[in-house]
Image (tube, grey):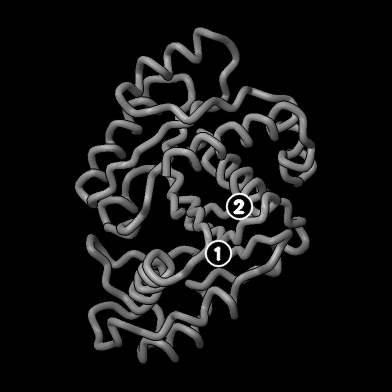
Amino acid sequence: MKIAISGKGGVGKTTLAGGLARYFAENGGRVLAIDADPDSNLPSSIGITVQDAAKIKPLATLKELIAERTGAKPGTFGGTFKLNPRVDDIPDEYGMEFKGIKLLTLGTVPKGGTGCLCPESTLLRVLLRHIMLKRGESVIIDMEAGLEHLARGSTESMDAFIVVVEPGQRAIQTAHQIKRLAADLGVNNIFVVGNKVVDDGDRKLIEEGVAPMPLLGFMEQSEDIREADRKGISAYDIGGDFKGQIELIAKKLSEII
């Protein structure tokens, strides 16, 4: 199972990604969690401490690795470098292990204009393609907010997209835009998870707004999640309703894919 979690900024993508990674690992799955959001918060959502998360070096910042694999100095644009660098060892060599999850943090690639072709972006794109096609574990990618990653085609070969939607028209509109762009990439399994839900009115707004996209479930507005964020721990470790909601979403997803 290889899924990308997307949506408008601030809707709770990382909360869902961390919860799903923990659930699948806890239930015997091999999980590769990829933090593709430049505003990296997936480590804490999984449960990695702030101190350990600070030790993580995003792949895009590993200048020696990028130069070795691509044959070009990072930060250069338009030069000559390998378009198919070796990447098969990167997940095992550079991933952080935590409770049955292997975590990779991609980092931010400098932008040299539309359609950037630079050593960093090439290495990360080839790595993602390798992971999608060659790796056997479940893959959960916490995508950057918005639509740019879809326009770059960096999430091709996914089994499904999960779009996180909060009760609001902007989040709903973003979900429909993601659906259209994902379909252009050949990904037709587009699911929705509602987040920050307070009452039946919120549920109805999301259900009607995202139709005909299927809903996997809801995550309620929760003091447990706020408390986890304040403490810098995973909401999954607090338990309560959040853990049960993640379980329902994960089981429904597993039945479909």
Q: Secondary structure at mark 2?
A: helix
Quadrant in which the C terminus appears: top left
Looking at the picture, tell me which residue is in the foreground, 87 or 244. Answer: 244
Label 2 CA crowd tier, 10 Å (few <14, some 14–19, many 20+): many
Do the residues bearing badges 1 and 2 touch, measured as CB atoms within 8 Å? Answer: yes
When asked about the image quadrant of residue 110, the answer is bottom left
Residue 246 coordinates in the image, percent (x, y): 62, 35
First along the sequence among labels 1 and 2: 2
Looking at the picture, tell me which residue is in the foreground, 26 or 176. Answer: 26
Residue at the image point whose x is 47% and y is 20% from the top: 167
The CA span between labels 1 and 2 is 9 Å
Q: Which residue is mark 1?
A: 105
Report the disc number at residue 42: 2
Q: Secondary structure at mark 1?
A: strand
Residue 135 coordinates in the image, percent (x, y): 46, 69
Residue at the image point whose x is 60% and y is 52% from the top: 42
Decide if residue 246 is on the left or right side of residue 113: right
Label 1 CA crowd tier, 10 Å (few <14, some 14–19, many 20+): many
Position of residue 68 relative to residue 111, above or below, is below
Residue at the image point whose x is 71% and y is 26% from the top: 241
When asked about the image quadrant of residue 25, the answer is bottom right
Q: Mark 2 belongs to which amino acid?
A: Leu
Residue 180 coordinates in the image, percent (x, y): 23, 38
